[in-house]
Every structure is written in structure tokens, then in C-alpha cells.
Amino acid sequence: MASITYDGQSFVLDGRRIWIVSGSINYARVPRCCWADRIHKAREAGLNCVETPVIWSRHEARPGQFDFTGENDVRHFVELVGKAGMYCILRPGPFVGQGCDLGGLPPWLLTTPNVRLRTNSQAFLEACSRYITALAGQVRDLQVVSPGSRRAAAAAAGGGPIVLIQNESGWTCGHDGLAAGYLGELDRYYREAGLAVPIVNANDLWQGVEGEIDGWTGYDGLLSHLRQLGWVRSDQPRMVMDLRLAAERAWGRAAEPAHDGGDILARIMEVLAAGGQFNLSPFAGGTFDGFSAGRDPSRADAFLTTSADAGAPVGETGSWAASFRQVRRGCMFASRFARVLSHLELRSPQVSLLPQGAAGTGTSVIHCSGAQGGVAFLFAGGERGKTRAADPTLLLQDGSTLPVPMGDEPAAWCLLDTRLAGRSQLNYCNLSAFALVGRAFVCAGPEGARAHLSINGSPLEAPVPTGSARLPTVIEHEGIAVVIANYAQLDLVHPTDTPTGNGSGAPGGIYIGVTGFDADGRPIPHPDLKAYQFIDAEGNAATHKVHAANGPARPTKSARLVLGEWSCAKQRNYADGSGPRFAAIEKPADLVSLGAPYGYGWYRFSMSANSPRKSKVIFPHSAHRLHLYMDGESAGVAGIGPGATSAATLSLKKGRHTLVALAENLGRVAGGSDLGEQTGLYGHAWEAKEVRVGKPKIVASDPVNLLTFRAPLWRVQEDDVTDPARLTWTVPHRSKTPLVVHIPELEGPAAAVSGLLIVNGRPFHYFQTGGAGAGGGMVFLDLPALNRGNNEIQIALSHATREHADELGAKVRIYDCIDCFTAKGEWAYARWERPGTDAFELMRGGVPAGRGKSDGLPAWWKSSFAAPSPEEGAAPHGLLFDCAGLSKGQVFVNKHHIGRYWTATGAGKAVGPQTRLYIPPSALLGGSENEVCIFDEHGFGPGKCRVLHADGGVWDS
């Protein structure tokens, strides 16, 4: 039985130091049929570990009913990681964030009496215990410390690949009592369930539990932060658990460009220079299929797109992103020279210049050394592609100099006094090391530069191949096969270890002139080369000719994909409330309690008007969007996001009326202090009139302790209080009607401001101006919070500037709810569901494209297309569905819920940024007709929609 321990340098598995080079692959976002491919790409990128979060809501959709089969077979995913010879970091949660609806927690928790999420709530902890026990039963024997025969893997030994468990995610509240009562209990559950590997957190030193490894998250300032982490946690390895490569994209917002590959490479080198190990998040992109996407907690309307690639080196369709090449260089070095990095002595790091990146002008050098060798990390200043300072020259310890060619790269690294193999000692090398397999050593630099290296005191100087050379230079020197490549040539250089166990796969060594390895571990020759080179672990080189029969298959011409005739099922009988599926309910209630944990639900309210009137109506108890229909006619969208308004104007004639609302849960917040929000229409609608209160006064008052009012709150310490100066409005209110305070969102730096709404001297509501809640920032005030007479409404901000206070004060609005619009009448509810086959009518006159003559009512559309068979060049990477001309809605292929689209508002204004959806291979029937079904909220026609091959990705135009 293996044992795993750790110290301030690295983890130690069975007495051998190991070095974690990890990337996140979320199995819940990648189709099962693609799991092995993404894991294979991770290994080809130089990773030796895969991190994966476990999405609780997928495995326990109903209390006590667990599903670990099919697409939810987490055990199979972990086994594939082990089969690839890699470690696994498992993130059981229970909260994982990751942009998931409710952070991955199951929605049924919201109906549990007395439950409070992510804290020491007994009801919540009992549910967590049951879930952790069930999950542990699936993977308990797949830990590196599990009993079992030694596995045939390059990386791991023992019973399985799981090397670490991460507890929770980003628990950044300063309340020590809650942390011990919640995080400590979770740790106990893990241990009692048989999970025995080390436990790490990702709380940025806000909170931790005794026995846990404190991990870091982020992208900027990693060298500085990790040095500080090592200073305060000198007995623990330094781990960046979430080296976040990009933010998730949100509907209605321009897609932020992914980080440049060179910039990511520099961040990886900062981590290594600080003696840190890392997890790239995400390494492989995925899909928020179905209704699984959540909301970014930084803004109330930041609902995440269906595509979840977030700048990953491997995109949603499995294609390599632009950053892959440089990410591979950094990760391959980190894993192939794990022996050197894991022995670096960094308890007393040297004073150095902080890397400045594009803002700097010079080069920073960080020199680290240890028992197995040293590394000099170099970070260039200035923008890439622009004039920089001359290439730096290192002054070595013996007084000699070493010129380091950096070219246009933001980072380089030079090995010093490093043992390569046997008695071969690399004294220095001015090119960046890439890989080492036995006596084969690979290094790379800019085209045309001069390589300077020395082995056993014998110097070697040679040119780096220019761009005209297809393959690197191979030189035998002091018993070592030295491969000198330019950066582009590294695409054709692939190291692999000697296979063990069943002996399948290619022999261990360096392959030159191949594009990688197939699923069986055999080299894939480059289609334009007639031969490839192989250098074995003893440094012996051989050339292998490629026979046409053994070469890679040339790409075949893609079969044309054509959509057939369209059928339509209008939803008029739902919009006018006449449908037979409506059932009476006592009062409006949230969607979860009505049996709709995700997606949509139909509410119907029947009423009588004694006289004609026009009413301005608000829905303070609703989230996230209500498509309103008055007597069967579209009456707009109330809520948040593009095309919606905070109030609706409803015109009534004398007599009976039916108001129908198609309520949409657009994705609950994925984290933050609004976690657990209700969705749907869970309270009455009100006729409202704005109260003119004027500019607020600034009144000095006693500060309020935030965590005394409510806990946990994130990034709040136990002694954090509100600012003494409060924005104050005096509101005369002599009736018994409620008030609504609308707290707006602020942009820029002010978006991070938080505070308390205080009513008549009592704290009432905590808010963050960057994401004021699912209801669009509407705070409902009713008796007994209000007085008959003057009411003092105050906002006490925390850590805000006067400019922030002035900006917020000018935008706050207060409404008097003069009458309950839905006080008298009958309520009913109907599930949102796909119509039966007989409800669809064939569009014989041609299908409309886009808005056309749409009446604004929802519609379902159905068509089919023939997916190519293997003989026709089947789509191994899946297909794309182009939603051109549609408004907003859902796409299903063969009843598989592909996801949400949001191409335009009901008025036809473009939304985006995503207009194409990924159809995974598992959803397709190759060589057969495939059904596509669309639900469009505004009834736009699919005349412009297309099915495309996934040659590039969803973001390629």
C-alpha cells in the first residue's frame, strides 16, 4: 500500500518526490465519448495530472437517488486518467463554482426546511454527508494510497491515480467559527468515507482547516503571491489550484479575447520560479449543455453562454487553440524536469526584480537551485512584436557569461548544473529545455540563434535551425543525444516513456517528425514527411521511413449537411392560457417548488377589471425573465438582460382578462452572496409609482459589522464594518402599501462595492452593486419594516469612495407599490414541455427566416438532417448548429438538449456573442436522419439555420 506525504518543496509518493503539472477537464462538460481524447491531449501537452470537479447536481438530481452511469460515470473518467499514466485531482465540492448553475449544488436543496448553503447548517451538512459517502463509494479504491498491485503507469503507483482531494472552492469568509463548523465537517466526511489522500483548498489563505494544504488561485502576480504563500506555509507545497486562463463568456457582452499563449507561458514560469505547482483552468473547454450554465456573480445579468471553453488550450470541439503550442512548451518542461523542480530549495529565495511584462522595459532573472540542479528563469519586459532591449547575458557563478536568446518570447529558462542521465552533467544551456528521456535531451530557442551548452565540462555551440528547416538538429555530445529545435519545430517533437504493463504503445524516447501519438500510443507520422526519426532512451537515433499504407489518412471531403423541411408548433394555447395542461395553484411559487428545477414554467393569472385602465406593473418577486402575454398578445419581457425592462405597461378593458407569464430561470448565480436565489414568479405583481425623493443626504452613523448581520459573506473579515457615512433618504409613507428600493448595478471599479440597506435604523438587506440579485436589484419593503409616516432608508457602503457613493446615490430609485395587481384572481401553472408529434404542422409555403411576421408568441420548430456515415467521412469531432435568424431559446438534437442560444432580442437586435452551438458526436446518428428541434421564445423562423462541420469551433466565423 502506497503512502503520500508532503513538505515545503513537493509531494512525496512512496519516498519519491513528484511534481504536479495539472490541467482541468470537467467531465460533466465533455461528452463521455470524448473523455479519452481530451485526456490524451492533456498528456500530449506535457501534463501529468488532470483535475476534475464533481457536479453534485448531476449525480443526485433527486434527494437520495444517485446516478453514476453513462455521462455521469465519474469512476470511468478517473480510470481513463489512470490508464493514461496520469494523476488525478478530484474536486468533490460540494460547491464547485465553475460557472455552474447554483455552483453545482442540486436545486432541491432550496426546498429543504431551514437549509443554509455553504455553511454549518445541519440540513445542508446532512445532505453533503450523504453525497460524499455515495461519491466515495465510486472512487475510494482509485486513490494512489489504495491497496492494489502497482499500476502500469508512467506517473502514478498504487491502486489508482487520485493524488489530491480539494475541499470546497473559494470559501473566503473570515468567520472562523463557521469555517471550522463547515469546512472541518466536510474534511471529516471525506476521511470517514475512506478518502485518505491529502486535502487541499483554494481559499487564498482566507480560511483553512488543520491538516489541509492551503492553495492559491488567480492569474496575475503569481511569483509574488506564491513567495508569500511559501513564507507563511513553509511546511506545505505551493499550489496554484486555479490558474484561471480566461473568464467565462456571458450573453449580451462582447467575448473577451483569450490570454495570449506567450502570456500564459510567462505565468507558468512565474509559478515554477516561485517553487510552485499548478492546475490550468480550464485546459480543455466544454459545453454548458441543457440548462447547466449559471450566472457570473459579478453582475446581475452576466448569464453564461452555452460554450464553456473560456480560453482553454483545447477548445470545445477538441481542436487546439492558439495558446496550445506555448502552453505545451511550459508544461512539458515542468513535467519532464520534475526531478529538478521538486528538489529546488526555496526556503530563502533571493531578492530579484519583479517581472513587469508588457509594462516593463528590462529583463528579470530568478535563479533557483537545489540538489538535482538549478534553473535561471528570465522574464522579458515590453510588448511582444515591438522593439525590446537586447537579449540578456547571464553572469554565471564561475564568472563566465552565457548569452540567452529570447527573441520575441516573454519568458525563457536555462538549466544549470543539472544531471541528465548517469554521470552526464549539464553545466549550462542557453536554450529553454523542453524534454528529457533517458539520454535524449531536447532544447529550443528562436530561429537562427546560437545554442551554447556544456556537458561534463565540454562545450557545444551550434545554430538553432532556421524556418526553412523542417526538422530539428540532432547532435551526439558526451553520450547525450542533443536535439536543438526552433520553437515551431517543437510541434514535430514528441517524447514518450517506455511502456510497461501490457507493453502496448511506442518504445520510450523522442520522436521527431510526428504529429503526436494515436489512442494506442503509436506515433502518427506527419503527412508531408516521408520519414521520422526516433531517439531511444540510450541516445541511439534511427530513421523510419513512412509507407503510404501506414501514414496518416488524408482528410476526406466533408459531406454536405442539409436541413430538411420544417414543421412548426405554435404555443398560442399556452400564451392565451387556454391550454389543458394548466393546473390551479393557491398562489405564485418559485419554479423549484413547482417541479421545475431548471428552465421555464408557465404561470396563468385570471382576473376581472371593473373599469378600463393602464397600469405600470413591477414584479419584485421574480427571476430572471417573464415573457408576458395579456389575453394572448405579447406584452413584453419583464426582468433583466437584453430586451427586458424592469416594469411592464399593461392595458386593461372592463371585463375578464388572462395574464400569462412564461418564466425563465436563465441560470442561478454560480457563486457569491446571492447563492440560493429563487426563480420564476414567487410573489405578487404590483402597480408601482416612483417616489420622488431627491438627492440623498450623507449622515454619519455607527458602523455595522457585516458578518454580525449575515454570514457567510465572501471576502469579508470578522471585523469588517460599513462606512460611517450613510446615504440617507427620508420617505413620507402614510399608507400600508409596500415600497421597493431599486439598487442599480454600477460599472468599473464601483462594481465591487458592497453594503447594507438599512430601514428605519435596522439592517435589512446585504447587496453587491456589481450583481444586485436575480430580481434586478429590487428590494421589497413591507410591514413591519416600514412606519406609518416618515421612513428613513439608508445605504451603508463598505470600503467605498465618496465617488462610488455619489454614483450609487444618483441611481437609486424608490417605488410605492400603490396596488397589488394580482391580489384578486385565480392562479394556475403548467410545465414547459415539448409538444407531441401531432402538434407540429408542416410549413408547406416555405419556412420564415428570422423575425419575419412573427406575432411574438413562442414556437417549436422541427426538422432533420442526414449525418455522415463513417464511409462518408463521419464527424468524429461533432457538428455545429448555426442559430442565424433566431431570437432566443433552446436546441435539441435527437432529444439531446444541446443548449441555449441567444442570437437576438424580440425586436431583432443582435445579442450574442455565441451564435453557434456544438453538437457532440454522442448526440448524432451517423448515416441516419437526425432530428433537430428548436424552441424559440419569440417565434422567430429557422429559415437561415444551418448544420456545419466542426472544423474550427463555435467561435470561428
Image (cartoon, rainbow, N blue to C red):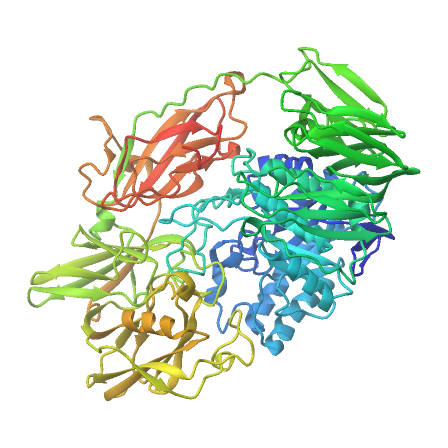
In the displayed structure, 404 sits above or below 200; it is: above
**Which residue is pictured at 80% across the width and 35% down the height?**
453
- Residue furthest to the right in view is 423
Q: Quadrant of the C terminus?
A: top left
Q: Which percent across, then down, holds residue 93? A: 60, 59
Which one is nearer the viewer's eye here, 810 or 592? 810
**Residue plotted at (43% across, 81% down):** 723
- Seen as rendered, the residue at the extreme top is 548
Residue 225 at least partly seen:
yes
Horizontal side of residue 936 vs 540, given as left or right: left
Q: Quadrant of residue 47?
A: top right
Residue 27 appearing in the image: no
176 relative to 244, above or below: below
Image quadrant where residue 512 sits: top right
Q: Closer to the camera, 149 or 48? A: 48
Where is residue 296 shown, x and y percent of the image? 45, 57
Q: Position of residue 854 (x, y in %)?
A: 20, 40
Q: Nearer the viewer, residue 478 or 639?
A: 478
723 relative position to 871: left or right: left
Residue 744, given in percent of the width and then of the height, sits at: 32, 66
What residue do we see at 18% from left, 43% from top?
Answer: 855
Q: Is residue 488 above or below residue 528?
A: below
Residue 364 or residue 19, whichever sits in front: 364
Count of numbered marks: 0
Asked if residue 369 is positioned above or below residue 620 in the image, the reply reads above
